[in-house]
Amino acid sequence: MLRSTAFVLLFASLAVLQPAIAQESSSNDGQIPAGVESVPSATQSVSGEVIAAESAIAASDWKTAESRLDPWIATHPHDARALFDLGYVADAQNRLDDAASLYRRAIAADPNSFEAHLSLGLLLARQDKPDEARPELAAATKLDPGPAGPALKARAWRALAQIDRPKPGGDNDPTAASNDLIEALKISPETEDDTLLAASLAEDAGQYDAAEGAYRRVLAKDPKSSPATTGLAHLLLARKQYPEAETILRAALVQFPGDPVLTAQLATALAAQDKAEALPLLQKLHDAHPDDSAVTRMLAEVTADAGDYAGSDKLYAVLLAASPRDPELLVAHGQNLVHQLRYVDAYAAFDQATRIDPASIDGWSGLAFTASRMERPNDTLHALTMRSQYAPENASTYFLWAISYDKLRDKQQAIVYYQHFLDAAAGKFPNEEWQARQRLEILKK
């Protein structure tokens, strides 16, 4: 079976379900196109230069717009409308720092400029600056959008929902994003993206039935929706409904052949079912994405599961070269070395892993096992003691405790742990159980 860490990394890497703030903010389409749709207040006059610039903006003639706006702003540095228009022009040309500066100047000149707050918030979100984007978007939701209407205010709420989504390991309020989305839906019709976001939020909250229902509603309307397919598959994999996920993914790959996310998900479903097809599928995916560490990690794990420990370790060597202090990679490397009977090298890998992560259960388990094979009972007992702080004992650890005490000639402790081992093994380890009974007979004499 594949280790769950690889699933997480792979889906994060390939963006299994990332409702896109970038899509929400990556273009000016849907924003107020500069001052064209704005209406000045009764006390505000609009310069002919600004009106001419806005006509050029409407035609995407950025050079002409700038030639009109630059000299005007030089003599009218607090004209909020002109500043916003010039910011819009910079934004459209992907001069994001210039655009952000001009939007901020527009806000300073007119703190009630809805379009400036919205555009700055979307730009900052696109730059992955959620802490800076949020207050701008929140401000936009409290302002009158004017002739732009509620659709653009709804856009601000939707962008906030993306920012407020719970993050792994974060302290986000799990209800905040849902509340943002509800506010958007109060003033605009529900879209497919809204349903997908609602599904993802329900999944984040552990409301799996609701999430599944939402994904299936999207697919009922749009059977070719790749985000809904990947979202539903991700949910089914999380719920360990591997055969159903496999069926959905095979059908989806007929529509989207070679899709890396769908391919990775299918490989996950197949590997979880111990199907041999997972390995060639991952090899093909790795060939297409050789620099994707998550794909490489999954391939390394499946290769090890297939018994090719040397081949798997070559892949781990590549991963460790890039991340030499990743304890999970070190543990996986050590496990491959154990299978190749390279106990000294394996011990070093496990030792390094536990030094980096003292709570690594697999690291301490590997260290105990390799120390035992190297006839180092004191080191074995130390590793077992450390492991016991983080995980309960099992038949394997009881056996290691027993044989270590036995080697140290601590008869009483050896007897106790051999008996613990026999109780836990319950016939699952016949060779070791025979050995334990033989030693108990001798030790009790």
Image (cartoon, rainbow, N blue to C red):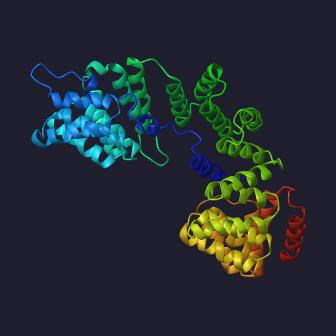
Q: Is residue 290 left or right of residue 145?
A: right
Picture layout, residue 431 above or below residue 240? below
Give whichever of 340, 161 is nearer the camera: 161
Picture layout, residue 379 above or below residue 300? below
Give whichever of 81, 387 is nearer the camera: 81
Look at 21% across and 21% down and name the residue there: 39
Q: Residue 174, percent across and down?
A: 45, 36
Q: On the image, which quarter does residue 53 sit in?
A: top left
Q: Is residue 400 left or right of residue 112?
A: right
Q: Is residue 405 left or right of residue 80?
A: right
One can see residue 342 in this view: yes
Q: Residue 177, percent across and down?
A: 43, 33
Q: Residue 395, percent across and down?
A: 77, 61
One can see residue 135 in this view: no
Look at 41% across and 36% down and name the residue there: 27
Say how many tags the image has: 0
Picture layout, residue 373 above or below residue 271? below
Look at 74% across and 64% down and name the residue there: 312
Q: Residue 363, percent across and down?
A: 64, 67
Look at 29% across and 31% down and name the residue there: 56
Give whichever of 252, 160 is nearer the camera: 252
Q: Quadrant of the C terminus?
A: bottom right
Q: On the image, which quarter does residue 102 sit in?
A: top left
